[in-house]
Image (cartoon, rainbow, N blue to C red):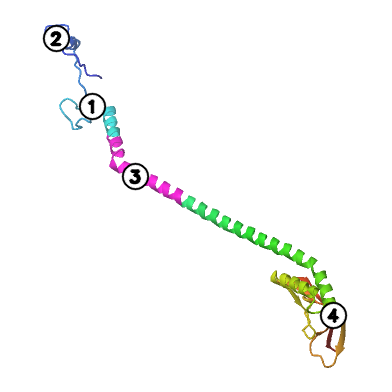
């Protein structure tokens, strides 16, 4: 039912009050919510609202519940949920960043290790290609073709010093203990006086660069019976 907002004319016998009187009924606004400002009207029983409409009471209860949920407590609960969601996102992004950093570090280490290995391999190829030249120089010394004080002796010494500065090392001397990872035995003899296998004769010296063997020393060995 709606409240008639028109002002009755006391001079009009056919006005709203007159019509209502003639019809035998009157209009009473029993709504719990004021349609003008949305406020809740007092819910206590009065002389005019005894046995009021239950739908109006339910509407008033729903309105009060909506007001309470939208109050400070509801806003605080919503803010807490939003903060928790943002903190979870920050934690996920932090973990992803840590994984990306670890992958970057590992990738950089692999690249550096590969570059260093490639550099060593290239240097080893160059040094290996010059071993035959060093063999000729050594044979020349043994046969007296490279006399000390001659220009060729000075050039050979400079070449050997330069290769040595690049990590080239010559090894293999008579009396050294035989190591199959460093030496290649071309002949072997037994001796009752030998307690271990040792190098007796160096046929060709060995060369290595760091831990890499460029050429094993070719030797003759002597060992126990």
Label 2 secondary element:
loop
Tell us which disc is closer to us: 2 or 1: 1
Residue drawn at the location 75% of the way across and 73% of the way down: 160
Residue 88, placed above or below residue 215: above
Dot 4 or dot 2: first in sequence order is 2
| Foreground residue among 56 and 218 | 218
The answer to which of 1 and 95 lies nearer the viewer is: 95
- Name the secondary structure under disc 1: loop
- Of the two numbered discs 1 and 3 on the same chain, state the one appearing first in sequence: 1
Write down the residue under mark 2.
9
Q: Secondary structure at mark 4?
A: helix
Proximity of marks 2 and 1: CB atoms separated by less than 8 Å:
no
Q: Dot 2, crowdedness within 10 Å: few (<14), some or many (≥20)? A: few
Residue 77 is marked as: 3
Position of 21 with respect to 157 (left or right) is left
Q: Are marks 3 and 4 in contact (CB under 8 Å)?
A: no
**Residue 148 sits inside the magenta stretch:** no
Task: Assign the N terminus to one quadrant of the image.
Answer: top left
Asked if residue 157 is positioned above or below residue 76 in the image, the reply reads below
Residue receiving disc 1: 37
In front: 213, or 202? 202
Q: Position of residue 139 (x, y in %)?
A: 85, 76
Q: CA distance from mark 4 to mark 2?
A: 145 Å
Q: Earlier in the sequence, mark 3 or mark 2?
A: 2
Residue indicated by mark 4: 142
Residue 17 found in image quarter: top left
Segment colored magenta: 64-90
């Amino acid at each position: 039912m709606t409240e008639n907002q028109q002002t009755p004319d006391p001079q009009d016998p056919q006005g709203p009050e007159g019509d209502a009187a003639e019809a035998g009924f009157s209009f009473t606004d029993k709504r719990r919510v004021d349609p003008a400002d949305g406020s809740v009207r007092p819910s206590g029983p009065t002389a005019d609202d005894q046995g009021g409409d239950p739908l109006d009471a339910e509407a008033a209860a729903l309105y009060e519940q909506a007001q309470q949920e939208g109050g400070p407590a509801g806003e605080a609960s919503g803010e807490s949920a939003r903060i928790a969601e943002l903190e979870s996102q920050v934690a996920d992004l932090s973990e992803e960043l840590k994984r990306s950093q670890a992958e970057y570090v590992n990738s950089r280490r692999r690249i550096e290790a590969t570059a260093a290995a490639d550099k060593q391999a290239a240097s080893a190829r160059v040094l290996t290609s010059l071993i035959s030249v060093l063999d000729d120089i050594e044979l020349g010394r043994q046969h007296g073709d490279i006399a000390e004080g001659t220009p060729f002796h000075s050039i050979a010494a400079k070449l050997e010093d330069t290769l040595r500065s690049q990590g080239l090392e010559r090894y293999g001397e008579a009396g050294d203990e035989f190591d199959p990872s460093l030496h290649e035995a071309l002949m072997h003899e037994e001796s009752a006086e030998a307690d271990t296998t040792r190098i007796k004769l160096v046929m060709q010296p060995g060369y290595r660069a760091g831990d890499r063997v460029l050429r094993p020393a070719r030797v003759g060995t002597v060992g126990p019976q």
